[in-house]
Amino acid sequence: MTAGLAHAGGGWLPRPLRVLFADEVKRLGFLMSLPAQLLLLFIVVFPLLMQIYVSLTYWGPLDGESWIYAYKSLNPFENYGELFADGRFWASIARTMLIVVVSVPIEFLLGLGLATLFVDRFPGRRIFYSILLTPMMIVPAVAGYMFFMLFQSNGPINDLLGRLTGLQVDFVWLSDPDLAIVAVMIADIWQWTPLMFLILLAGMMGVPEDQLKAATLLGANSWQRFWRIVLPKMKMVMIIAAVIRVVECFKIFDLLAVMTKGGPGVETETLSYYIYKLTFADLEWAYVAALGLFVLIALSLLAWAALLRLQIAQRRAETQPGA
Amino acid sequence: MAAIRLSHLTKKFGAFTAVDALDLLIPDKEFVALLGPSGCGKTTTMNMIAGIEQATEGQILFDDRDVRRLPPNQRDVGFVFQNYAIFTHMTVYDNLAFGLSVRKLARAEIDRRVREMAALMRLEDRLEWPSSKLSVNELQKVAIGRSAITEPAIFLLDEPLSNLDAAFRAFMRTELKHLQHQFQQTMVYVTHDQIEAMSLADRIAVMNLGELQQYGTPAEVYNRPRNTFVANFMGSPSMNLLPCRLIAEAGALCFGFGEAGRLDAGGDGAMQHRARAAAGAEVIFGVRPEDLEIAPPDGPGGLKGVVSFVEPVGPRTIVHLKLAEQTVKVAKEKRYKVSIGAAVRVTAPMAKCHLFDAASGEAIGLG
């Protein structure tokens, strides 16, 4: 029945599509998802093509011409060449990486530690739990403003450090080339440890209690239970938590925009912030297009490589005896 | 090797008393079953022995050592959970090795003992398997092997057979008995299955509503139940418990069952003495289905009844009889034939009958 219908209905289609249409259900599915597919075409494919096009030119908003005429300044791959020589670009990537490799592990360890404390019931647990989660709920720009105030040279943090040490403390946190990035990291850790804590706590609560009891009765102390039962069982949740934070942290922008504006100089300029400056201060739109594409491709390759490794590991696990 | 002495052991959860002043002595190397319906406090008792639950009151002694303050990982007890609690992220090998490796034994020693245990449990070809891929029967074997490998002095099993299929359950029952013999451990076994308890245990502690009902060998508990709860709980089908009146007749007592007739308590037998001891009280007459006899309706003595239905249960046939006011079950051999509606007479040998006080449920005249 379907073969006959497909022949009558899809005879005019090219062969690959005819195969797709051989099944009535598939055809119906295709038709019903067509509007969404078209929408996707406009919101993903079209801008991407436009970006590729613009990235191959010197077109900018000051040209006074629509982007359609960008071909007039066509310069195959010169923007890309420039990019490799752009020290400020590479420095911004290095700085972003630095924030990621310092902040995320600290957030992870703090979150894990807190989760370990909160997995057991204790009086006041719910209240402390709510308090701990508050930073995460605050709009990042507002959090940035809070830390902007806290880190003023005559602000509360210097005051507190002074009282604790008994010394005259006058760090100019946000204008010091070395301290500014530390201040940003502290703000990021303060704001995002709660998210780590939340995810890791959920994972820890999911560790079956009877297996923990069994481990205890087999003689394991709490340290051994943690390393041999809790951590291995949380592996997947830990990977998820870390990936979410790495991706988010890589895009860090709002805290910087309020706290340092990338300064002093370019000392806290991250990738996002550099792109922002290029776009709105320097109006280098064609260059930004090239830069954006480059980062997209680089990150895609990295993600692909990571996925491939994960798949290989999984396949190895599945080919174990008993599969 | 250890004897376990529980004295006045009590566990309360808020206002609810799960275990009430339990006194129990479990001798070294014995296999003791804690038997009772769900909610009777048997698992709570076991958890207190293991240290997973803290006792509200009372003492737990291993030999003469008070272990109430000892954390569970230092009590040296093996514990097999009802759902096995196998470490699903590990291989069978690592599960078996767990207890030894947390004790930091040498790798070669661990390897030797794991392989020994695997051979004993017939798990050799499963050692490298991830434990998440095992069947229920294999999980059971891993759970027992994992606890037994550390050679604990005390071995606790919480309904270990209840999730198994019937054939493997029967197999595991014999296997457990062998293992206990081999390991020479004190074993405490929680179950609600009286057949398991009867076939495995050296002694049975029957519990109900947090209280110990009777503690004795399977034969004692079966043949001389202390009260109607034990009488009813042990044996399948359960004992017939029939309220009756004591009637004095020519200097001797007999049991009256209304229109159905009377049962003679026997001129000078033990039952006559018990009946005399009970004189004046409301009593319950107890007799196991397999001890009752069915006779033609026109003989002397016995109770008159009508067959209400016949239930073939494999090796036996259970005949349900309707007396005047009560029903009784009689267990007969597999081939027994009787038609529904037939009028019969049922007799009971007094030596195998029981007498309970109707108010307290306690057995009367049980020495």
Image (tube, grey):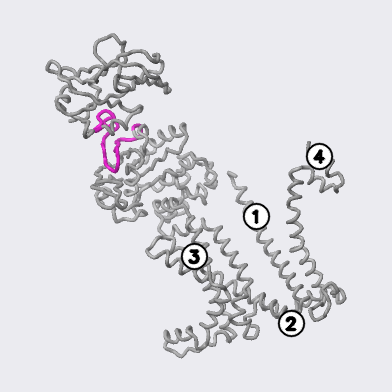
Amino acid on which disc 4 is placed? Leu
Q: Is residue B206 magenta?
A: yes
Can you tell which of label 2 and label 1 is closer to the viewer?
Answer: 2
Q: Which residue is mark 3?
A: A112
Q: Chain of mark 1?
A: A
Discs 4, 1: same chain: yes
The residue stretch that appears in magenta: B198-227
Amino acid on which disc 3 is placed? Leu
The earlier-in-sequence mark between 1 and 3 is 3
What separation in Å lies between label 4 and label 1 (alpha carbons)? Answer: 41 Å
Q: Which residue is mark 1?
A: A311
Q: Is residue B296 magenta?
A: no
Is residue A134 left or right of B57 when viewed as pictured? right
Q: Is residue A268 visible?
A: yes
The earlier-in-sequence mark between 4 and 2 is 4
Q: Which residue is mark 2?
A: A282
Element at badge 3?
A: helix
Residue closest to the eye, A170 or B302? B302
Q: Residue at x 19, y 19 (%)?
A: B254
Q: Identify whether A138 is placed above or below B127.
A: below
What separation in Å lies between label 3 and label 4 (alpha carbons)? Answer: 60 Å
Labelled pair 4, 2 in contact (Cβ < 8 Å): no
